[in-house]
Amino acid sequence: MQGISLMRSAAFGGASVRPAMAQRSAMVSRSPVVVQAGVQDVKGTVVSTAMKHTIVVAVERLSLHPKYFKRVKSTKRYHAHDADDSCTVGDYVVLEGVRPISKLKKFTVAKVIRKAK
């Protein structure tokens, strides 16, 4: 068994198989890592337009559950700047990341993909 060490644990009275963390593959890349900034463009549905020049957009993402490997839907709400107040509830929009406009607003509306009916 290559890369796996056999460790004895006194607490359990048996052997457990764990990957050896000290051994490192010779194929490890030493090239510099490219650090990418956070998400800059997101797509979502407008859920609130109650504030002046501000909309709230709900963005849904699918991720794998770490234990069960089932896809789990997660929703995050972003505050975005809408300069001309053209968006309505139910619109599907693209948000573009900008410098912080206020405490919560770090996005602006880039374009409206689909208007609400």
Image (cartoon, grey):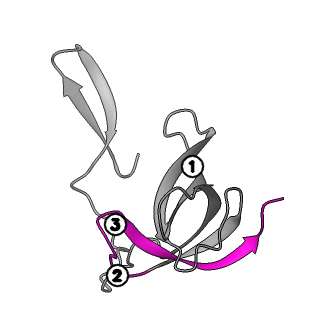
Which SS class for mark 2? loop
Query: Crowding at label 1, few (<14), some or many (≥20) Cα neighbours within 10 Å?
Result: few
Magenta range is 98-117
Please give the name of the residue rendered at 50% of the width and 77% of the height, measured from the top-left corner.
Answer: 108
Residue pointed to by mark 2: 99
What residue does disc 1 label?
63
Q: Secondary structure at mark 3?
A: loop
Marks 1 and 2 sit apart, C-alpha to C-alpha, by 28 Å
**Displayed quadrant of residue 93:** bottom right
Picture residue at 38% right of the left edge, 77% below the top? 37
- Which residue is tagged 3? 25
- Residue type at mark 3 is Ser
Amino acid type assigned to the residue bearing label 2 in the image: Arg
- In front of the other: 28 or 105: 105
Q: What label sits on residue 39 in the rendered view? A: none
Q: Could you tell whether 2 is left or right of 55 in the image?
A: left
Q: Residue at x 53, y 74 (%)?
A: 82
Residue type pointed to by label 1: Ser
* Residue 116 magenta: yes
Q: Is residue 70 above or below residue 91?
A: above
Quarter of the figure that contains the N terminus: top left
Instruction: Tell me, yes or no, whether the two marked residues, 3 and 2, touch with CB atoms within 8 Å.
Output: no
Mark closer to the observer (1, 3): 1
Q: Nearer the viewer, residue 82 or 100?
A: 82
Q: Is residue 7 left or right of residue 80?
A: left
Residue lying furthest bottom: 31
